[in-house]
Image (cartoon, grey):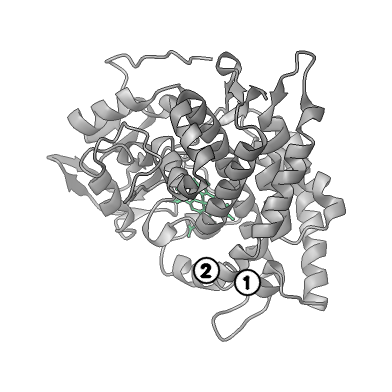
């Protein structure tokens, strides 16, 4: 693993940097010297300043999501929320928001704590012969998957199936396409049974609400709901897993902040925001221009794919004083780790809940943990930044 990677001066393609130890030398050069940069090999334009990125996400008429939001241009078969533009996006988001109420998210709090404690109590079962535990396997990976299963009303007996299929779908990069397809089919079959049951016996759960129309909005079709469930799984689990893993490394490297946090848990809330800002799980997402865009003396042509480097915006000195300082008490903290505007993360409040509770429970369980920094493994990704292996000595 390239933990000591230093950016070379001739390589300003930010995509491979999502998975190096410190991508910020490259992001800084982009921001300061090439705020509108064209990566010819990828046919990809890159914006890296906070103000430019905000302006682009606030203008979906010029910067469209409908041709995919990842640099490869992948668009899911069932086009859903994240790859829709207004007016389709507006209608779908309104329909979905009925189920993502602050009350429903807050009600998850006890369940999240229960899952976190249950996993941490069984962490020793994952220890290797030398007494090291992989916290990815035992904690940061299963926690968000269990929370998602709960949100979608998956029966507890089906949780292992949900996790097996979920992992196959979420961590599918480089996987055998047949395995991925089989996992998608198994999960689809299961969800279709759940939907049919909820239509017959609707309850107060998220699926029932989305399948029923109300004064506030229309019902989703079963096909739309299926697309949404897959999006929630892909957008809501690896990202949260990554944020937890990134937190563990940041608090390994900055023991003083860890000590402060253990002694004063009222700092958790601002610490979570700072972890998201300082080491953002989603480094960037893209849009496609619907017109020529003139910026900093350059013209991005209509039809160009433009990568919005959220992680660079989050270190822009024009937006954050002393941006490379990790400050768990930083306020205000207007980071764009959850995006901004119409596509602002639908699960942000749930993610914040999971991170606050997950981190609090972790620090209660293992305040003196030591991360085996040389043994870490990063998740391979063009856009996300997190770990697939986190060996720890408790
Ligand atoms: C730390 C964890 C998370 C991070 C860093 C994160 C990040 C993001 C970002 C950057 C976007 C904006 C997409 C864009 O600009 O095109 C987004 C959108 C979205 N996120 Fe999250 N997310 C997280 C957790 C979650 C969770 C837990 C859920 C589900 C419960 C979720 C569901 C979604 C959905 C559905 C969208 C699309 C919203 C739309 O297009 O209207 N995310 N997320």
Q: Is mark 2 within 8 Å of ligand 1?
A: yes
Give x and y (percent) for residue 208: 71, 73
Give x and y (percent) for residue 62: 29, 56
Q: Which is nearer the eye, 14 or 311?
A: 311
- The residue at the point 12 percent across, 40 percent down is 297
Q: Is residue 101 visible?
A: no
Q: Which is nearer the eye, 48 or 37?
A: 48
Dots 2, 1 in contact, CB < 8 A? yes
Q: Which is nearer the eye, 121 or 64?
A: 121
Question: Dividing the picture into quarters, in which one does residue 306 lie?
Answer: top left
Question: Dividing the picture into quarters, in which one does residue 286 lie?
Answer: top left
Give x and y (percent) for residue 340: 37, 55
Mark 1 is surrounded, within 10 Å at the Cα level, by few (under 14), some (14 to 19) or many (20 or more) other residues, namely some
Q: Could you say whether the residue bearing mark 1 is in a helix, strand or loop? A: loop
**Number of on-image labels:** 2
Q: Is residue 297 visible?
A: yes
Q: Is mark 1 within 8 Å of ligand 1?
A: no
Q: Does residue 224 appear left or right of residue 54 in this picture?
A: right
Residue bearing mark 2: 92
Residue bearing mark 1: 220
């Amino acid at each position: 693993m390239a933990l000591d990677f230093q950016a070379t001066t001739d390589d300003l393609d930010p995509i491979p940097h999502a998975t190096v130890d410190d991508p910020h030398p490259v992001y800084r050069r982009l921001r300061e010297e090439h705020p509108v940069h064209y990566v010819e090999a990828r046919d990809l334009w890159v914006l890296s300043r906070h103000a430019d990125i905000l302006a682009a996400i606030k203008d979906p008429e010029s910067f469209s999501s409908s041709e995919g939001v990842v640099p490869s241009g992948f668009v899911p078969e069932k086009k859903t929320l994240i790859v829709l533009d207004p007016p389709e996006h507006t209608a779908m988001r309104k329909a979905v928001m009925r189920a993502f109420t602050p009350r429903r998210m807050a009600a998850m709090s006890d369940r999240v704590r229960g899952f976190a404690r249950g996993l941490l109590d069984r962490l020793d079962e994952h220890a290797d012969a030398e007494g090291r535990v992989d916290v990815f396997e035992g904690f940061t990976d299963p926690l968000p998957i269990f929370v998602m299963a709960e949100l979608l009303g998956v029966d507890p007996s089906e949780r292992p199936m949900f996790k097996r299929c979920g992992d196959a779908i979420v961590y599918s990069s480089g996987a055998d396409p047949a395995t991925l397809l089989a996992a998608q089919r198994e999960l689809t079959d299961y969800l279709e049974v759940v939907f049919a049951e909820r239509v017959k016996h609707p309850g107060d759960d998220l699926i029932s609400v989305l399948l029923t129309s109300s004064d506030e909005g229309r019902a989703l079709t079963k096909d739309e709901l299926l697309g949404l469930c897959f999006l929630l799984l892909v957008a809501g689990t690896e990202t949260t897993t990554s944020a937890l893993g990134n937190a563990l490394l940041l608090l390994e490297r900055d023991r003083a902040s860890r000590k402060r946090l253990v002694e004063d848990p009222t700092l958790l809330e601002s610490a979570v925001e700072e972890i998201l800002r300082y080491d953002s799980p989603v480094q960037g997402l893209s849009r496609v221009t619907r017109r020529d865009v003139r910026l900093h003396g350059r013209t991005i042509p209509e039809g160009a794919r433009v990568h919005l480097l959220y992680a660079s915006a989050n270190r822009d000195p024009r937006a954050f004083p002393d941006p490379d300082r990790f400050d768990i008490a930083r306020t205000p903290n207007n980071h764009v780790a959850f995006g901004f505007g119409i596509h602002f993360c639908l699960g942000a409040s749930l993610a914040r809940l999971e991170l606050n509770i997950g981190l609090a429970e972790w620090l209660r369980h293992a305040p003196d943990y030591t991360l085996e920094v040389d043994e870490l493994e990063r998740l391979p990704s063009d856009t996300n930044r997190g770990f697939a292996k986190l060996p720890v000595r408790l």
